Every structure is written in C-alpha cells, then in structure tokens.
Amino acid sequence: MESVESQIAEWRAYVANAPGVNGRDVDELEDHLRHQIGELNAVGLAADEAFLVAVKRMGDLDALSREFAREHSGRLWKQLMLSGDEEPARVSSAWLETLAFAVAAAVAIQVARLIADFPDEEPSWLFRNSSLFVLPFLAGYFARRRQLDTRGWVLTAAPFALAALVVNLYPWDADSATEALVALHLPVVLWFVVAYPYMGGTLRSHERRMDFVRFTGEWFIYYVLIALGGGVLMALTALILEPTGVDPDSIAEWVLPSGAAGAVIVAAWLVESKQRVVENMAPVLTMLFTPLFAVMLAGAAVVYAVTGLGDAFDRDLVSVFDALLVVVLGLVLYGMSARDPSESPGWMDGIQLVAVVSALVLDLIVLGSMIARIGDLGFTPNRTAALGLNLVLLVNLAGAAWLSARFVTRRSRLHRLERWQTTYLPVFALWAATVVLILPPLFAFN
C-alpha cells in the first residue's frame, strides 16, 4: 500500500498543477480516486492494479490522465491509457498568459526605476518596495492558472495591499535599521503569500505545502539558470557594442531590472510546464551538494566548539552563519521533496542527518554568542531580528534532527518528518511578518 500512496501523491500533485483544475477541488478528486480503488480492491484487484484502473475511470480527467501517463512513460499504466496517436489538446494561450504577466512585471519595475531615477539616485522606498513590484504578478499568474474565484483573488490581493500600505505609511527615520530589515524580510512574507494561489486556495493540505516547497526549489534552479544565461548575454552585448561607442551601462539600466523581474514569471512557467527536466536534476543536485554542505558544517561545528571561537561572532559573521543555516534547511527540504517517500532510509538520509545535527550545533553556538552580546550591549533591531530567526531555526532543526534520526534508525516513517516541516513552514512566514509589521514601531522606526 505504501507504493500506492506514493502513486496517489504523484497523481495528486500532477492534477493540482493542471490549469483547468481548481486547487480546492483536488481533495474531492482524491477522495473519488480512493473510493474507486477501494471498490476495485473489494472485487479482488491488487492495490497497484486498482490504482491503474481507478485513474482510467476518472471520467472528465481522461485527457489529463493520458498526459500524466505520457509524462511518466516508464509506468505500466501508459499502456492502459494511451491509444494510438491520440494527443491531448494543447492550451495555446498558456505562453501568452505567461508573457503578459512577465511583461507587466518588467514594466512595473522599470516605471519604478524611472520614477526613482535609479541608479543616479538610490531612494530607500525603491528597495523597500521592490518585491511589491514583482511578486503580485507572480501571485496573479498562479491565481489565473488555478482559476481562483473572486473570493480567491481578493484573498490573494489583500496581503499585498496591506504590505504596500504598511511599508509606505510607516514614518521611517533616516538610515533606519528597521527599514533595511523590512526590505530584506518583505520578499519572504510575500513569497509565502504566493503560496496561497499556487496551492489553489488550499492552506491546510500538507501535500500542497510540500508541492510549494518543491516548486520553490525548482523555481530557484530555473531562475539561476536564466540569470547565468542573461549575464553571459549582457557581457557579449557589451563586447559587441564597445567599438560603437554605445555605453553598455545605459543598456544594462534598462535590461537588467526588467529582465530580473520578468524572469520571476518565466521561471515559474518553466517549473509548471517542464517539470520532468528539473525532477531529473533534483536528485543529482541534492546528492552532490548535501555531502559537501554536511562536511563543511560538521567541520565548522567541531572547530568552533573545540576552539571556543563563539566569542568571535560579530554582526557580519552572524549574518553569514544565518544565511548558511537557511541554505542548509532549504537544501534538506528540497531533497526531501524530491525523494520517493516509499523508499527505505539510505546513506543520503544519514548524510542529511549529519548536516542537520551540525547546523543545530552551529545554531546553538551562534545563539550563545548573540545572547551574550545582547546582555552586554542591549537589544537593537538587527540583534532582535537575528535572535528571533535563530530561535525559529533552532526549533525546526531540533525537530528535524530528532525525526531524521528516528527515520534513519527505522523507528519512524519519512511521512512524520515531512509533516513536521510542512507544519512548521507558517512559523517562518509569521516571524518574517513580525519583522515587517511589529519590529519597526517597537524600535520607533529607527
């Protein structure tokens, strides 16, 4: 039954990503599928056979199921569901919608740049609002693809409107530390807002939360690839235009902001339409980088613990370690999302456990240094934000280490570790929102 649960989870994720399926209906569709499987089991079919036939019976989803069979061509049920040269209908307007949202984001960021006269001027409001010029279009893109109703669109737009009012009505002081913190944390808050339309308006589904984790990792990969390609293109353009006397910097002022904004939407479209490409890359990336990070973290934890270098932590070094811990957590989450839940624990799970435990030790060392510094110098906005983040990471890493150890020793299932992570995700969103909404007035906007 474990393999059937894995197949159902895969089918659910595929159906939920279909443009014509409202995310709020996915639970009902899954219930129908399970009912069909139960009936087929009752008449004597094996679990795997019952799943294949039940998917075939899914009425209005026949075309979608046939496409699912094509995408997973190695599976037996491709033979049951594909017939001859039958091809599913292609949605010709999909790329036009993507282009429209990408162009809208590119135009919005460019208009803001022109109003701010960047880079000649560097007004703080531009950096503070930069995510508000892009991420609403990504949320709208998913709301359109998931066919949210009016209520869903309103619930999607409301957090963006609230964030825009808050960050622009707060009376910021000159060189405000809290304003800089808001500029760093607001994109995190808004990224979690994007999760709502991505999940089709469902908030309580652990499976859909894990889908969003998987999307985030795949989106990051595509965005980095687009950025690298764009960087090469800009460098070649500058070399070609050098003899003409055209200033490449003036071209970059127009191309880079718009390209960076539009690529946010394009990368999301690539994840939606080219999932098999990244699904093949994900295990390779996690297998390559997880051991490297595990070795680096374990070495750092031993060195700092043995030598007592915790007192050497200053603000910059704390920021580096916090970024490192977040990257490791993201790598573990992405590796988990790309893993088959039905597989038994292997050597890679042991390496991930080493990485998590090492990150936990480093987090404790950083926390000790921060508490000592706060005791000597008092609270500041930066110290408060860093302390909160490290406490949030501490709880997450401690839970992940405990459940990972139980899974590796075969005393628990991967399902419990996944549930812990998906249940904890809103805590990160809540802390980022706290930094944006509460920390500035708490420190008098200094």
Image (cartoon, rainbow, N blue to C red):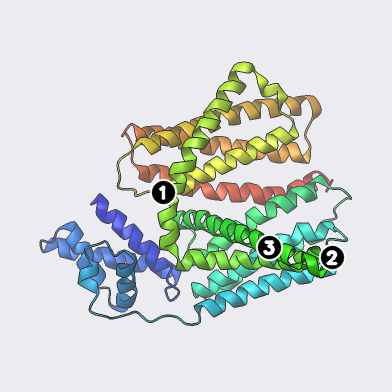
Q: Quadrant of residue 232?
A: bottom right
| x and y, in percent, of residue 396 in the image | 52, 39
Q: Residue at x 74, y 46 (%)?
A: 439
The three-letter amino acid code for the residue at tag 3 is Leu
The furthest residue to the left: 44
Mark 3 and mark 1: span between their CA atoms? Answer: 33 Å
Mark sitting on residue 236: 3
Q: Amino acid at mark 2?
A: Ala
| Residue at x-position 33% and y-position 31% | 409
Q: Which numbered dot is residue 383?
A: none
Locate residue 354, reporting x and y percent: 46, 31
Q: As displayed, is residue 164 above or below residue 307?
A: below
Structural crowding at the residue carrying mark 2, measured as other residues with C-alpha within 10 Å and reported as few (<14), some (14–19) or many (≥20): some
CA separation, marks 1 and 2?
A: 43 Å
Location of residue 244 (image quadrant): bottom right
Name which of mark 2 and mark 3 comes first in the sequence.
2
Mark 3–mark 1 CB contact (< 8 Å) = no
SS assignment at label 3? helix
| 7 or 260, nearer to the observer | 260
Residue 279 percent across, percent down from the top left: 42, 56
| Residue 177, position as x, y percentages in the image | 81, 45
Q: Residue furthest front?
A: 243
- State the image quarter where residue 313 is shown: top right
Q: Mark on residue 283?
A: 1
